[in-house]
Amino acid sequence: MLNVVVFTGGRGSEVLSKRLLARKDVSLTLIVNGYDDGASTGAVRRFLGDSLGPSDFRKNASRVASATSTATPALVDLLDRRLPVEPAAARAAFDAIVADGGASAGLNPADAAGVRQRLEAFLAVPGAHDFPFTDCAVGNLVFAGSYLLRGRRFNAAVDDYCGLLGLPPGVIDNVTNGENAHLVAIDRQGIVLSTEETIVDARRQNSIDEIFLIDRPLPGGAWTAERARDFFHEHAAHITLNERAAARVDAADLIVYAPGT
């Protein structure tokens, strides 16, 4: 058995061919960080208040499940579907999925029940009905339900979400024990980059001078590099290594550092 570990962002599994993913003599682990805070994953993070971002885990789970046929195409398609951009249409589409768990989209009864259970857990949180559903990936909301059903334990939510897609625990794993943290940076011109989304924005062609993980989002307002650096040190995130992921690295025959955005 060849043990392969891939450190990846949301696109990392694209470097692996379907032939490799489906091989029975390969034990694959995709190790992801959850610091993404853009688009709908950012909306989910802000709503939950204490969660890492689900999108990169969702994307890799979909690709691996599709390549290994552990989930039906209908389930993968539903989880990767983005709700409409227009607010009323987005809410109507979401409500329709909650009503039947996606059965009308071709899901079998077991999958539909699993989707519905997780979406109802999401809706049970106060304020959920006011969530900005526009252009949100359905799977991110299902993941939020997993997070809530698993007692706000992020790594348990990863396993729960992957289980919905028929993937065993540990195939997709978080690099840490799930402590909430936010990626920020200062570029070489002294400009403060206050989100992961800004840091990885290819249009900016950022040159990073310093990078930090902090335990809360950077408050709005004007930040000089000096003031921001003091805030970053004061609110440095305390994170711990996921020992299950570390054990997979120790046992690896091949380690791949895959491209991200």
Image: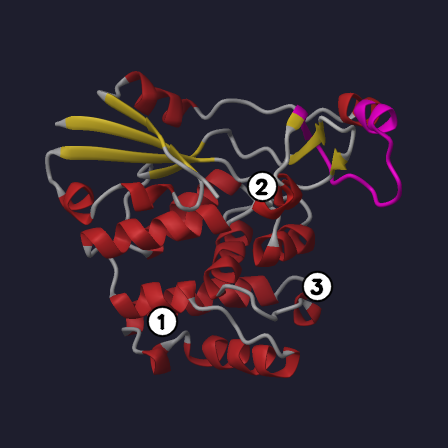
* Magenta-tinted stretch: 209-229
Label 2, label 3: how far apart the Cα atoms are: 32 Å
Name the residue located 50 percent from the left edge and 63 percent from the top edge: 137
Q: Which of marks 2 and 1 is nearer the N terminus?
A: 1
Name the residue located 40 percent from the left edge and 46 percent from the top edge: 11
Query: Residue pushed farthest top?
Result: 250
Q: Element type at marker 3?
A: loop
Disc number placed over residue 171 in the picture, else none: none
Q: In this view, does 143 lie to the left or right of 226?
A: left
Name the residue located 76 percent from the left edge and 29 percent from the top edge: 189
Residue 158 image position (x, y, % from top left): 43, 45
Q: Is residue 169 above or below residue 78?
A: above
User: Which residue does the numbered mark 3 point to in the structure image?
Assistant: 126
User: Which residue does the numbered mark 1 point to in the structure image?
Assistant: 112
Q: Does the magenta stretch include residue 191?
A: no
Amino acid on which disc 2 is placed: Val
Amino acid on which disc 1 is placed: Ala
Residue 61 image position (x, y, % from top left): 35, 50
Quadrant housing the N terminus: top left
Label 1, label 3: how far apart the Cα atoms are: 24 Å
Residue 167 image position (x, y, % from top left): 28, 48
Q: Which colour scheme is used?
A: secondary structure
Q: Earlier in the sequence, mark 1 or mark 3?
A: 1
User: Which residue does the numbered mark 2 point to in the structure image?
Assistant: 200
Amino acid on which disc 3 is placed: Pro
Q: Element type at marker 1?
A: helix
Q: Can residue 212 be seen in this view?
A: yes
Q: Is residue 228 magenta?
A: yes
